[in-house]
Image (spheres, rainbow, N blue to C red):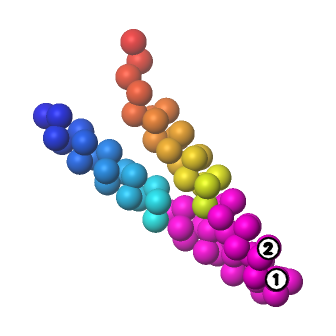
């Protein structure tokens, strides 16, 4: 039973990381197309990755908690 929960959490983490990767890639590319500044594009991509990952993990934790 414990291994099933750990496996499910790993799957959710993988999905969250992939979603954050796609969002950050899109943000970086859009930023690059707008101003052609590599540094700004990398910073924006990294910030959007971190923000998206934190948001998704927070939502997953909220949905997975048990009401006591």
**Quarter of the view holding residue 22:** bottom right
What number is the disc on residue 40?
Answer: 2
Magenta stretch secondary structure, dominant: helix
Left/right placement of residue 7 relative to residue 32 reads left
Residue 62, how many percent across, how many down? 49, 33
Q: Position of residue 38 (x, y in %)?
A: 76, 82
Instruction: Give the quarter of the figure containing the N terminus.
Output: top left
Residue under pointer 1:
37
- Asked if the stretch drawn in magenta spans residue 68, the answer is no
Q: Do the CB atoms of the residues marked 2 and 1 lie less than 8 Å apart?
A: yes
How crowded pointer 2 is (Cα within 10 Å; few <14, some 14-19, many 20+) is rated as some
Judging from the image, what secondary structure is the residue with disc 1 in?
loop
Residue 60 image point, x, y percent: 46, 41
Name the residue located 31 percent from the left edge and 50 percent from the top edge: 10
> How would you rate the neighbour count of disc 1 (Cα within 10 Å): few for under 14, some for 14-19, many for 20 or more?
few
Q: Which residues are magenta?
A: 19-48
Q: How far separated are the C-alphas under marks 2 and 1?
A: 6 Å
Total marks placed: 2
Looking at the image, residue 23 lies above or below residue 30:
above
- Give the farthest residue toward the top: 68
Quadrant where the image shows the C terminus: top left
Left or right: 56, with 31 as reference point:
left
Q: Nearer the viewer, residue 52 or 46?
A: 46
Residue 66 in picture, x, y percent from top left: 38, 22
Which of 2/68 is in front? 2
């Amino acid at each position: 039973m414990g291994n099933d929960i750990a496996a499910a959490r790993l799957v959710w983490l993988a999905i969250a990381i992939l979603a954050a990767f796609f969002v950050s890639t899109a943000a970086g590319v859009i930023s690059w197309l707008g101003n052609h500044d590599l540094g700004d594009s990398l910073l924006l991509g990294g910030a959007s990755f971190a923000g998206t990952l934190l948001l998704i993990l927070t939502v997953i934790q909220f949905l997975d908690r048990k009401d006591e």
